[in-house]
Amino acid sequence: MRWFYQCTECGTKYAIEPGRYLCDSCAAQQEPNRPLRGVLECRWEGEWEESDGDIPFPVEKRYFPPLPVGRTPLWEPERLRQKTGFPALFIKDDTCQPTGSFKDRASYLVGAFARSRGIREIALASTGNAASSMAGVGAAAALKITVFLPKTAPIAKRVQVLQYGAELREVDGTYDQAFDESLEYSRRTGTLSRNTAYNPLTIEGKKSVSFEIVADLGGNLGQPSQHPVVPDHLFVPVGDGVILAGIYKGFEDLLRLGWIDRVPTLWACQAEGSSAIVRALRGTGFGDPVPSDTVADSISVDVPRNGYHALAKLRAHGGRGVTVSDGEILAAQRELASTAGLFAEPSSSAAWAGFIKVKGELKTDSRVVVLITGSGLKDINGALRGLQ
């Protein structure tokens, strides 16, 4: 098996190596205030030789940090099933990751890549979860982590970053400004960038959840299945589009391996105050950015960096989009906690709010999975707003 990067727009192939982030020719067409052009994906040639259900990744297992990332539980929420009338409703709970968020899946692979290449420092911008995630993985892997974080990020996420021993550089501005500052730092110092979408490994790492969901539902990974178990609908909280694209990548790989026979319908769930990808899906694409305004800080972005890539995946696989208000998000957060015992942060709760909003369009016997990506303990002030 030979791994390489491939441009999602023009198909050009590149070696997987430090300093390679985007396609040269497509990135040259980058327009201001638009999603990234020339986003790369990890691809392979040859046959996958594993037969035990392991997930194919472009980094050898021995380089992964000693941290229990992945294999999070798939809940069967009895009271929510009864309340909604969906007996085959499941919740994939990534609040159980080591740092409390889904972002550990990407940080885990980026950290492994750094270790495999002798890299000692990683830099990134974040609204909070990616920063605390990379900081935690970096602590386990003995890597220096430098994060650029908006001053408005929840205090719990800033505390996490500092507790893990990372260097915190607060930005007096938005995530988009933090993104630009972190890129300038990486270019100037030669530090490996973990910026979401910009580094292809952030997309690749997140595909692991697709493999887990199929296995959780009873799929026999590692062997072609005559009766693959795939969700009918999967609800995903969406900000910049990397989680969405990573999940699609996972199902595409499963399909290529012959372990499933179809890709589920993915629902991109966005806050009304930060809904660029859903607007693009419903219209003709991405226009001028609209300033974000939502309680769901982890999915609050003006320019979704992985927008073009995520939009192409949605359109290719018949994905759907739904927007929810802050009121609906906070109500969903309260419902998850008080009815299922799952305390999710507002951004994660957007996925549950999205399901509640469109469940009337779905068959009640559908197999539905709702992805919860972050713990409510990461944003107590947001949760307090839902109790007032």
Image (spheres, rainbow, N blue to C red):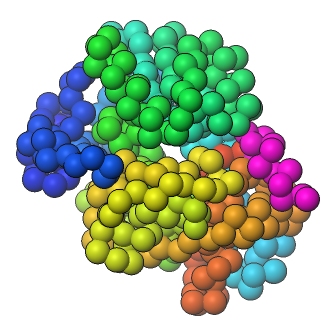
Q: Hey, which quadrant is residue 127 in on the image?
A: top right
Vertical relation: 172 (above or below) 198: above
Q: Which residues are magenta?
A: 376-388
Q: Is residue 377 visible?
A: yes
Could you tell me residue 222's position as x and y percent? 38, 52
- Compared with residue 312, is residue 25 higher up or lower down, i.e. above or below? above
Q: Which residue is pictured at 29% across the width and 34% down the height?
A: 58
Name the quarter where the C terminus is drawn.
bottom right
Q: Is residue 106 left or right of residue 25?
A: right
> Residue 44 appears in which quarter of the rendering?
top left
Q: Residue at x 38, y 32 (%)?
A: 180
Residue sitting farthest toward the right: 388
> In this orientation, does residue 133 appear?
no
* Residue 153: % across, % down: 65, 36
- Placement of 227 over or under 388, stated as above or below: below
Residue visible at 67% across and 27% down in the picture: 158
